[in-house]
Image (cartoon, rainbow, N blue to C red):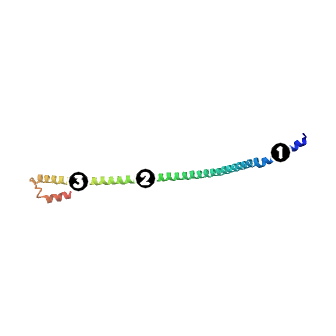
Amino acid sequence: MNINYTLFGQMIFFVVFVMFCVKFVWPPITSAMKERIEKIADGLAAADRAEKSLELAQAKAGEDLKEAKVQAAEIIDAAKKRGDQMVDEAKLKAVEEAERIRTAAEAEVEQQIAKAREELRSSVATLSVAGAEKILGETVDAAKHSEMLNKLSAEL
C-alpha cells in the first residue's frame, strides 16, 4: 500500500462525502437555519411591536388617569355647588316658613284682639246698663234701648 493511493482514495471518498452532504444533508440544515432566523426575526419584531404598544398603552393610561382626575374634580365641584344650592334653598324655605308662621301668629293675635274687644264691648254695655240702672234707680230695658247701647259700644 502506497501512501499515494491511500491519499488519492481518501480524497475521492472526501469529495463524494462532500457532494453527498451538499446534496442531501446541507439543504435541510440550511432550511432549518433559515426558518430559525425567520422565527427569531419575527420574535424580535413582535417584541419591538409589543414594546411600542406597551409605551402607547402606558401613555394612554396616563392620559386616561389625568382625564379621570379632571372629571373627578368636576364632579366634586358640581357636588359642592349642588350642596351649597341645597343649603341656600333650605335657608330660603326656612325663611319662608318663618314668615308664614309669623303671619299666621299675627293673624291669630289679631283675631284674639278682636275677640277680646268684642267681649270688652259686651261687658262694657252690660256694665253701662247696670250703672245706668243704679244711677236712675229704675230698670233699663235692654231691648228698648238697644240702639243707644249699640252706639255706646261702637264708641268704645
Question: x and y percent of residue 149 in the render?
Answer: 15, 57
Side of 7 where 26 appears, left or right: left
| Dot label at residue 115 | 3
Question: Among all residues in the image, which is located at the extreme front?
Answer: 1
Quick one: 138 or 72, which is closer to the camera?
Answer: 72
**Amino acid at the residue labelled 1:** Phe
Which residue is under mark 1? 14
Marks 2 and 3, how far apart at CA: 43 Å
What's under tag 2, amino acid-wise?
A: Met
The answer to whether 117 appears left or right of 103 in the picture is left
Q: Earlier in the sequence, mark 3 or mark 1?
A: 1
Q: Residue at x 83, y 45 (%)?
A: 14
Q: Are marks 1 and 2 in contact (CB under 8 Å)?
A: no
Q: Where residue 86 is drawn, which disc sits there?
A: 2
Q: Nearer the viewer, residue 122 or 11?
A: 11
How many C-alpha atoms fall within 10 Å of the one at disc 2: few (<14), some, or many (≥20)? few
**For the residue carrying disc 1, how many other residues have a C-alpha within 10 Å: few (<14), some (14-19), or many (20+)?**
few
Per the model, the C-alpha gap separating discs 1 and 2 is 101 Å
* Mark 2 secondary-structure assignment: helix
Nearest to the eye among marks 2 and 3: give it: 2
Q: What amino acid is at disc 3?
A: Lys
Quarter occupied by the N terminus: top right
Q: Which residue is found at the position 90% from the left and 41% from the top? A: 3
Vertical relation: 1 (above or below) 90: above
Is disc 1 placed on a helix, strand or loop? helix
Judged from the image, the secondary structure of the residue bearing numbered disc 3 is helix
Say which quarter of the image contains residue 17: top right
Looking at the rendered image, the disc whose residue lies closer to the viewer, 1 or 2, is 1
Q: Which label sits in the foreground, 3 or 1?
A: 1
- Spot occupied by residue 150 in the image (x, y as percentages of width and height): 17, 58
Q: Position of residue 107 (x, y in %)?
A: 28, 54
Q: In the picture provided, is 138 more to the left or to the right than 13?
A: left
